Image (cartoon, coloured by chain):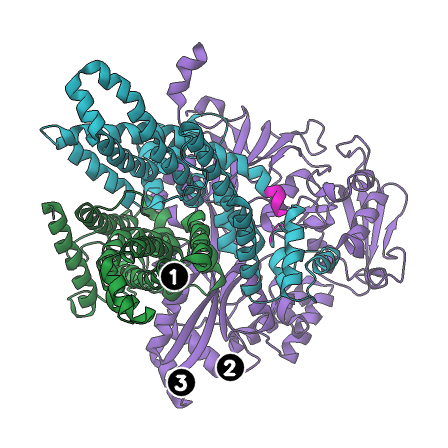
Amino acid sequence: MLALVVQPLSCTSSNRLEGYVYYRLNASPSTLDPALIADVSSAAIAAKLYNGLVRLDDGLGIAPDIARKWSISEDGLRYTFLLRRGVRFTNGREVKASDFKYSFERVLDPSTRSPNTWVFDKVEGAEEFLKGRAGEVRGFKAKGDYVFEITLKRPFSPFLSMLTMPPAYVVPREEVEKLGADFSSRPSGTGPFTLKEWLPDRELLLARRHDYFGGRSRVKGIAYRIIAEDLTAVTEFMLGNLDVIALPATAYARFKNDEKWSRYILSREGLNTYYLGMNSSRPPFDDPELRRAVSYAIDREKILNTFYEGRGRLAEGPVPHLLRRWKTGRPIEYDPERARRMIRKKGLEDLEVDMYVSADREVVDLAEIIQAYLARVGINVNIRQLEWSAYKDAVNKGEPDMFWLSWWADYPDPENFLFPLFHSRNLGPGGNRVRYVNREVDSLIEKGQYAVDEEERDYFYQKAEEIIIEDSPWVFFWHKTDYVITQPWIKGCRVYPVYSMDKGTDIMIDSSAVRR
Amino acid sequence: MLLVPLMFAITLFAFFLLKALPGDPVLGLVGERADPETMESMRRELGTDKGFVGQYAGYLKLLLKGDLGRSYYTNRDVLADISRKFPNTMLLAFAAMLVTVPLGTGLGFLSAVSAGGRSRFLERLIDTLSISGLSIPVFWSAIIIMMLFSLKLKLLPPSGTGGIRFLVLPAAVLAIPAAATLARVTKTTVLEILRMPYVTTARSKGLSALRVQLVHVLRNAVIPIVTIIGLDFGSYLNGAVVTETIFGWDGIGKFTMEGIIKRDYPVIMGCIITGTLVFVVVNLITDVIYHYLDPRIRLNVKKG
Amino acid sequence: MSRRGKLSIIIVAGFLTISLLAPVLPLEDPYRIDLDSIKRPPGLEHPFGTDNKGRDILARVVYGGKISIGVAVTAAFISALIGFGVGLVSGYYGGVFDSVVMTVVDFFLSFPSLLLAIAISIVLPPGIYTVMIALSAVGWTSFARLIRGHVLTVKEMPFVDAARTTGCSDFRILLRHIAPLCIPLALVLMGIKLGGYILTEATLSFLGLGAQPPTPTWGYMVSANRAYILSAPWMVLYPGLAISITAFCFNVLGEALRERYDFSSDIH
């Protein structure tokens, strides 16, 4: 009877679990198997279920995870990790060094069909294993139960950073073998949470683990509601049914200008770069001067401050400010007259180019704005919208003259914003979608990768970036800022620049402040 | 019966569309994410080296086995996903029907009665309401209703599962155009019957005769109304595509919309075939109800 | 015709005129991007406000109307033409051909119309022509059924027999005697169906299957801007109202026509 009376008072509330923090996901995660994860949603959840050797700390430096200490040999080839004792999988078994060997080899194993083999392909013996010529990877050695050693073919400075990624999480062999393909939906790891329930396309529930080696999390569990519509998600948030949401661009102004809510908006500059890519392998954009003219023609700052409502930081080059330990030169400024002159000088007025964009409303809007700016200097842009996978395909194959894309850090190292994107080895699907080829840049990037000393590394990357900015294969737009909004009763929520940093152990519900 | 050739026609149509898609029809069923084994077996089933008829036969075999292909994106079996989501849409349609039938017939009846009276105010009001109900696009009414009843008035939740209150808003949105159509048909039917000679004579003879005729009236009125309820079902399926998306209702409507946005052909085709099949079955049921109500009408009566 | 019907004809004619005259009316350029006037609420300079790129919404609504009404009217014509031809031949000759055709018609009527329109639209590249094709493909069946029914009645009439005995070819009979009697019917049905076409076009545009941006269509405007309803509701309100009011007026006209010409109630 009481329930019938109480019910009408909370007619708009959803069925919430007590003590759980409610987040929102746009779409169902594709898999929770760390070896197979290739998208941010799935990775963010996996971070709460699994651990690796190392993790990232607040300053984006490397911190211990399951490895409590490590050392790198003088020549930069051998990484030795001392593991913690007493770290247990959900089935109770303790994690040993051999588990890491198994987990890492599994990523390289052709039968796993992992898209993440690139994480480990620098390890000695990896190539042979990938090609099936060896039964194991020489470079992974379990020395006893608590010492794990990795040997690389050549020194590779970002390697330790890469070990913070999901493919480097440790998984229990017996569960993987028992479950086979089901392991994707029935994860079993060492993390602060376990998967309690997964209702596809509806909800995911993570429950707290009491014996987590890093200390019990402060909430009973985390729930992810799958809500595809931004409008619905924002409504649910305003009704108190969601605790934390990534603030959609369309709702930003609404909350920012609202006194009651604006103090609950959290933000952090993101580790990403948004850009307009120009196909540098063929006319007309094989000409660096024309590319620079395009940069002059677009008032990126104005677009950022008006259309984009200031939700980012103007990009001077491909490497985000958070990772750039050096200074760059003067950024390219808006100068349409100069652009017009340059184009006229080349006799290229009324140039027609194709711009491909993905079928995302915001992207299409940006494309139209860019189209308008370029029209003013004599370049006619034809916009073609494609749905996401067709778009990816076309861009990877080098079909369009121009395209709009972004690059998000896999790991916080400037190399991640140089090598995949501008090295000639990575043309197309590897990341270098503008098909930019510059031998000098190639060699500078490689020198940075092999350098053991950090200052040396930075020097090479700085030089490489300078050339890239000068050559302008991209119009560098901005580094998008991540915005998150929380309910008043949520404490300890932080925005992390890399999804894998959020293990869900900081957030708290202040039950005295709960009001729904 | 119409069902068998109709299903042939629908599958043939679906197959036409599959062939009309640019590229390899096998890709139209499983997408590139699928593993090579799946693609190979699909190729064998479809028999892409055979002629058109051969391929169609292969396609039919696949459908009969319940293989609607795999999603381009999730690589999950389409039929499995549809089976999971389908009951949710049925639940929504059923809820919408619970609102539509009393609302539509009630308003239609009132309108007819008012038409015979002196002041035709009620009739005109209901007429205007009906036409309005038919003129508002479902996607717009869904947004407005969610904003109004969820956000502003805080009466009902905008999404989620686990209770009747989650059904109310989406069902109401679906019910609006359906109730409008039903109201108009009811009004016309009731008017026709009220004007029939035996009714007017019954009236002049006195109340008891009228009561005897009333049963006959109702019986005859029910038939076209039942037809419309069957056809309204089609409008629930139509409306569900957008309504489920906006309210986050996990049914085949939302599945279709996601498929459309992502150009996930196996999903789109699977949903269309399922939706049509359901619609045909529902109309078949209404035919049967016809027959039960008035055995003089043959099963093959042509629907309007 | 009822007073309401006459009024609706005037209003519909008004819409048609405005959409045809759009380019010469004193409107802002619906495509002009103005980053300094983003999301302005309705005011003197922009009676319907501006969108998130600074474009004038009134202009976009009027131009969008041009497209919606244009597509609906054209599709109605095409459906009528196809249905007319098919119904005429089917009703006159009867027999196996007639049975086959009516089965096909029943088939098309068995599809929930939107699903069928979607099925057709995904195979073709998105755009206004695709929408016209989809609408016609779904709508011709009502015409076919209606005209066929009428032909069945008409062909038994004495003057047809007379024409036959004087040696007129079938073709001539169809063209000069029967067809003209069916034209008013077809026109009326066109009027009735217009409202539905407007709604279906809007829905297809909402789904992204209609004319592509930057071309303004009402459905796309509601779809693309729906999440802005909390911060800039005019971006969604006006296109939505435009669809509803236009469909309403066309439907009222259709209703008036239906009353006037007294069809049986189950025409779709």
Q: Name the residue carrying label 1.
A: C93
The letter of the green chain is C
Q: Three-letter amino acid code at disc 3?
A: Ile
- Left or right: B27 as drawn, with respect to A383: right
- The residues bearing labels 1 and 2 have C-alpha atoms spaced at a distance of 71 Å
Q: Is residue C164 above or below residue B11?
A: below
Between B117 and A200, the one nearer to me in the picture: B117
Q: Position of residue A34 (x, y in %)?
A: 70, 47
Task: Pick whichever of labels 3 and 2 is earlier in the sequence.
Answer: 2
Vertical relation: A489 (above or below) A140: above
Q: Is residue A391 left or right of residue C192?
A: right
Which region of the structure is painted magenta? B73-81
- Residue depicted at x 9% and y 29%: B119
Label 2 sits on a secondary structure element that is: helix
Above or below, A10 relative to C82? above
Residue on which disc 2 sits:
A288
| The colour assigned to chain B within the rendered structure | cyan
Name the residue: 65% across, 47% down.
Answer: B64
Chain shown purple: that is A
Left or right position of C2 against B246? left
Chain name for mark 3: A
Q: Chain of mark 2?
A: A
Q: Which amino acid type is marked by label 1?
A: Tyr
Is residue A215 one of those drawn in magenta?
A: no
Say if mark 1 contacts mark 2, CB within 8 Å: no
Q: Nearer the viewer, mark 1 or mark 2?
A: 1
